[in-house]
Amino acid sequence: MSVLKQPLANPSRIRGIYRYLLQAKGQREKIKVLARSLSPDKLVENKPTPRPMFEACIKECIKCGLLIEEEKEGQTEIVINPDLSEEARKPGTGDELLPNTLADLFFTLDNEDEYDLGLVCAWYLSQDVYDPPGTWEAVEQKVAEQKVGELLKMSNNTLYGQMDDWMGYVGLLWGHALGGKRFIVPDPTLYFKRNLKYLFKQSGEKILLREFIDRLAKKCPLFETGHFRQTIEVNIGRRESNYLSTSTAFALFRLKDEGYIQLIRESDADLIILPKADNRVDDNSRISHIIYTGKLK
């Protein structure tokens, strides 16, 4: 079972466990102590299953490799995985980087448990950012139209809620209220912003936009040319090879407007098309290179 199908394992609960362990001595704690600290006995007394949320979150954290379980002196301890990057394990940076850490763990090629989450995220990022399916009803209709119900296995609105929670936490969508109802939009700007320093070698580096997309897909295969996106596009129709999806293009335009990157066109260079609303293309949509300005958040 993945986090997509385990509604008890949501980002805030997993974050709470991780924040506790970041500050714990040796970044480890006896599982009984951890459970009682995060879910006190008084709150769970007389419950048929005392701590289902805690147990579900611990299980998912161990499955994805965020935490490990060790036996010490006859007691089970939960430990932050020492194989994570030093930045991810530092008390000063680990919490801020947790969305990235989880995205890296969830969407690696060898994580079969989260394969369904990867497909759902890649599918939603492939939708038109200017006219997205923003509610469960709209998602359900779009899944039926594109005939990907069997592939995505999104059969109920609990899965939609998990998609909303996890994509929002990782920085792949945002939501807003309209008429008292929540709507979501596939926009990976926040994910891009957090990862620019990993996608470029140095401030001021200029690379072909096509190379940037390749680097992005290698880090997070939800995006163009990544294996999750390729699986989705086989089923819903491929983009033209030199076109980006509107959600990726939208995020790049936002980063350009905010000063994080420059998007330029050089003569005789390989051009990528960044479509706008209604797939409109103008002179500013034809881009050959991207430059990282080095601007910090």
Image (cartoon, rainbow, N blue to C red):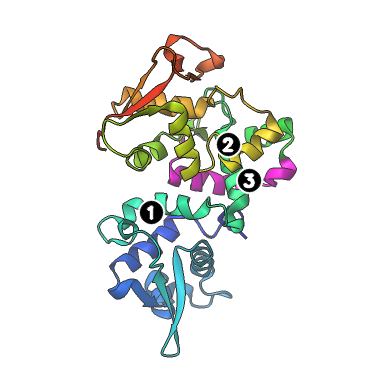
Labels 3, 1: front one: 1
Magenta extent: 149-174
Do labels 3 and 1 touch, CB within 8 Å? Answer: no
Where 182 sits versus 242, above or below? below
Amino acid on which disc 2 is placed: Tyr
Q: Residues within 10 Å of mark 2 (few under 14, many from 20)?
A: many
Is the C-beta separation of discs 1 and 2 under 8 Å? no
First in sequence: mark 1 or mark 2? 1
Q: CA distance from mark 1 to mark 2?
A: 22 Å
* Whether residue 85 is visible: yes
Regarding residue 40, the answer to whether it shows in the image is: no
Q: Is residue 70 magenta?
A: no
> Do the residues under discs 2 and 3 have CB atoms within 8 angstroms?
no
Q: Is residue 167 above or below residue 135?
A: below
Is 291 or 284 nearer to us in this picture? 291
Q: Residue at x 44, y 72 (%)?
A: 43
Residue 106 placement (x, y as % from top left):
52, 53
Q: Which label belongs to residue 98?
A: 1
Q: Which residue is mark 2?
A: 124
